[in-house]
Amino acid sequence: MKALVAIPVLVVVLVLDLITKAVAVATLAPSGLSNPVFGNWFRFALVYNPGAAFGLHLGDYSRWIFMALTCGAIVILWRLYQQTAQDDWRKALAVSLVAAGALGNVIDRIRSELGVVDFIDIGFGVHRWPTFNVADMAVSGGAFLLALVLWGEEKREMAATAAGSTESADLPQ
């Protein structure tokens, strides 16, 4: 069951991310110009992000540092996927979303020294959210869902532990 969810989601999100970035590079050049889609609050603007989320930059070696960190994260996500129960489609979905986004952005880092292609720009006037892409949405949404799933698992484990200790306390000595 988990592979029926995880593999198609990973492939679709990764392909969608790569296609939208290619279209952005082909149609939004030169970098930095805004193209309104729905007024000023939603627009497309080609931006190359050499750093991480929200423009976090670690100097000349940012590209290599973030590639290494992403590869480490993908290994962790693979292990988390392997430990996921076959019927736990929510966890499989969350892991595959995060992995697809991470792969999409690491592919950009490998392909170009300019950095990750970002192109979705939302906000009002000068108050803008940092420009992002499909991979960023997948990572954010997947991470949020994964946090909810893991929190639910922890709550169930705590409830089971509490129920087990209550039952053992009720046993005659």
Image (cartoon, rainbow, N blue to C red):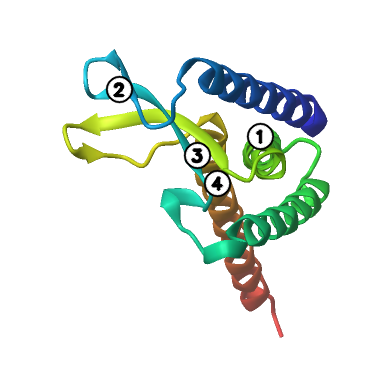
Q: Residue furthest left?
A: 125
Instruction: Choose between 125 and 137: the one closer to the eye.
Output: 125
Quarter where residue 45 is shown: top left
Precedes in sequence: disc 4 or disc 3: 3
In the image, residue 77 sits, relative to residue 36, either above or below, namely below
In the image, taking residue 137 as reference, residue 165 lies left or right, namely: right
Precedes in sequence: disc 4 or disc 1: 1
Precedes in sequence: disc 4 or disc 2: 2
Distance, label 4 to label 3, CA atoms, is 23 Å
- Classify mark 2: residues with Cα within 10 Å, few (<14), some (14-19) or many (20+): some
Say which residue label 1 marks: 93
* Residue 133: percent from left, percent from top: 50, 32
Distance, label 2 to label 3, CA atoms, is 18 Å
Q: Amino acid at mark 1?
A: Leu
Say which residue label 4 marks: 143
Say which residue label 3 marks: 48
Q: Amino acid at mark 4?
A: Ala
In the image, taking residue 66 as reference, residue 11 lies left or right, namely: right
Under circle 2, the secondary element is strand
Under circle 3, the secondary element is strand
- Classify mark 4: residues with Cα within 10 Å, few (<14), some (14-19) or many (20+): some
- Classify mark 3: residues with Cα within 10 Å, few (<14), some (14-19) or many (20+): many
Q: Amino acid at mark 2?
A: Phe
Asked if disc 4 and disc 3 are in contact, CB closer than 8 Å, the reply is no
